Amino acid sequence: MAMHDRDATPTVTVVICVHNGEKFLADTLDSALTQSYRAFEIVVVDDGSADGSHAVLDRYSDPRLRVIRQDNRGAASALTAGIEAAVGELIAPLDQDDIWETDSLASHVASMQRRPEVALSFSWFRVIDEAGRPMGIRSSRYRGTIDFPELLRDFVIGATSNVVIRRSAIDLAGGVDASLPRLYDLDLFLRIALLQPGNVLAIERDLMRYRRHPGQNSRNLEAVKLEWSRTLEKLRGLAPRAVAQVEEQARSNMSRYFARLAFEDAKYADGLSLLFEGFRFAPAPFITDPRNWLTAIACLSGMLLHPRLHRRLEKLAGLRLS
């Protein structure tokens, strides 16, 4: 795709929320600035960083990049600030530790242009470790469009950096909920899916590398569980019938996610307990989903096996952090 006129209004605003992101920030910025699609701007919201993030940002002089600094108020607040400052009609969130493939924006924009009814597109992605090495783990291979009930049942989007959203849809859905500092993205994407059937589209390519490392925001298990309960309550108020269709399966699948968080903190017995909770919510779907069995095997291996064999099973289950 040809270079755009730098004086033209950008179609896409990339929003990067940064809090103490020095370690990975340059890789993230480089992946955004080298996109093959060029009609974009980058708004970096520095959410009260106390490390060397400022110094990393100061190394960049690209005119497409703007930096907003605020006191630490959390990622949801930072994303809101970035959206409010955005010029583009499309918003592309990019976490401070993730990496886009070179044609990520081009693929999303092309999909949006072909499908004007689509409010949110999401791509497949691969998982890398703290050092950027592939972990052999991939996201869901979902295909086509997905409606609200199915997305609530199984949140196949799986991340934030693999998404591009029409700004108008964010406004119609009510914006980012800053009271959900860990699940604000899940909450927003589900509310966007509620706007119209078939308005969320999977791009069937790996366009992002999601980095797994111990300092991630979602790893506080009890806080995430509380926010999930609040999110469900909120969605029940917005769409009670649609939520009722799939709530038990949604709870079951989230229990597996909680079990994985417990596993990553080496709380293997808690992980098994959470898996059993997932079984009680939806026994038949639980039994037929291999992700539940892989997570159970990994938890059991952490309790019973030699560390070397345990690490091999971690990788098989897609749970190893490094």
Image (cartoon, helix red, strand yellow):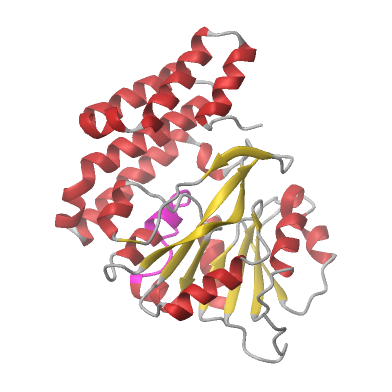
Give yes or no for residue 177 being in the magenta stretch: yes
Query: Does 88 sit left or right of 274 as displayed?
Result: right
Image location of residue 238, percent across then percent down:
22, 61
Relative to residue 305, is residue 222 depicted above or below? below
Point out the stretch of residues depicted in magenta.
Answer: 173-188
Quarter location, residue 16: bottom right
Query: Farthest residue toward the right?
Result: 59
Give yes or no for residue 133 being in the magenta stretch: no
Residue at 33 percent of width and 54 percent of height: 151
Q: Quadrant of the N terminus?
A: bottom right
Q: Can residue 50 be seen in this view?
A: no
- Is residue 304 or residue 69 the one in the foreground? 304
Image location of residue 174, percent across then percent down:
36, 70
Q: In which quarter of the image is the C terminus?
A: top right
Residue at 35 percent of width and 26 percent of height: 274
- Is residue 141 or residue 171 the one in the foreground? 141
- Is residue 15 or residue 99 the one in the foreground? 99
Predominant secondary structure in magenta? loop
Relative to residue 241, is residue 223 depicted above or below? above
Q: Can residue 146 be seen in this view?
A: yes
Relative to residue 146, is residue 303 depicted above or below? above
Residue at 22 percent of width and 40 percent of height: 248
Quarter location, residue 287: top left
Residue at 45 percent of width and 49 percent of height: 141
